[in-house]
Amino acid sequence: MGYHRAGFAVDGCDIADRPRYPFAYHRGDALTYLAHLIDSGAIERYALVHTSPPCQAGCALTVGTNHSQGWGGSHTDLVAPVRELLDASGLPYVIEQPNGRAEIRKDLTLCGEMFGLGVLRHRNFELGRWATPSPAHPKHRGYVRGHRHGVRRDGPYVAAYGKGGGKATVLEIQRAMGITWTDVREELTEAIPPAYTHFIGRAFLTARQEVFA
């Protein structure tokens, strides 16, 4: 949605059915689909590729709390194969990952407080074949509301993940992140605020204009 608001025509791809996705959509394995676009030459109609490989292998929750408690299982890290295809595409690209141990360059880091949102939702972005500076990271205004490590806190931000323990309701997540097109909790908790991709989209268009100026 953020890219759309920045002026892009958006095509999406996911392995799951996403009937609420508001733009052109291909259901299938993203690696296979990207390889098809490259091999067929259809990739040339695009200006930028944004990818969000599954992040469970390296996210802070997996390598922190879940690991310490013996929760969860093994996860496949798809960042490297995604990057290999992105390099082969010849296009500028974005790889998005949460804070954690994912093997990406942190060329850009965004936080909800940068955009006055009700979530923190820190995300790191590796930028391929283009660059833009990270905006200043303002001081957080307080805690994320809910239980953590046995302590209950209140604060100006909601926890847009999981259930129970003071986690946000679906409506609270929608309002905090600025997402209106889905009310499916799993989709909301996996999403990033459209303010992030709006910022990235505008930054990319500015960078491209500067190159051709």
Image (cartoon, rainbow, N blue to C red):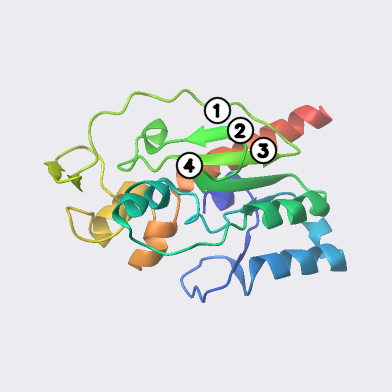
Report the number of numbered marks.
4
Spatial CA span between label 3 and label 4 = 17 Å
Quadrant of res 190: bottom left
Q: Is residue 74 visible?
A: yes
Cα gap from disc 2 to disc 3, whole angstroms: 13 Å
Q: Which residue is mark 4?
A: 123
Which sits earlier in the primary sequence, circle 1 or circle 2? 2
Residue contact between numbered discs 1 and 2, judged by CB atoms under 8 Å: yes
The image position of residue 2, as x and y in percent, is 52, 48
Please, is residue 59 above or below residue 162 in the view? above
Residue occupying image coordinates x 71% and y 69%: 33
Q: Picture coordinates of residue 142 (x, y %)?
A: 23, 31
Tags 2 and 3 in contact by the CB under 8 Å rule?
Answer: no
Q: CA distance from mark 4 to mark 1?
A: 12 Å
Rendered residue at 20%/45% (across/down)? 149
Q: Which mark is residue 204?
A: 3
Marks 4 & 2, CB-CB < 8 Å contact: no
**Tag 2 residue:** 107
Of circles 4 and 1, the one toward us is 4
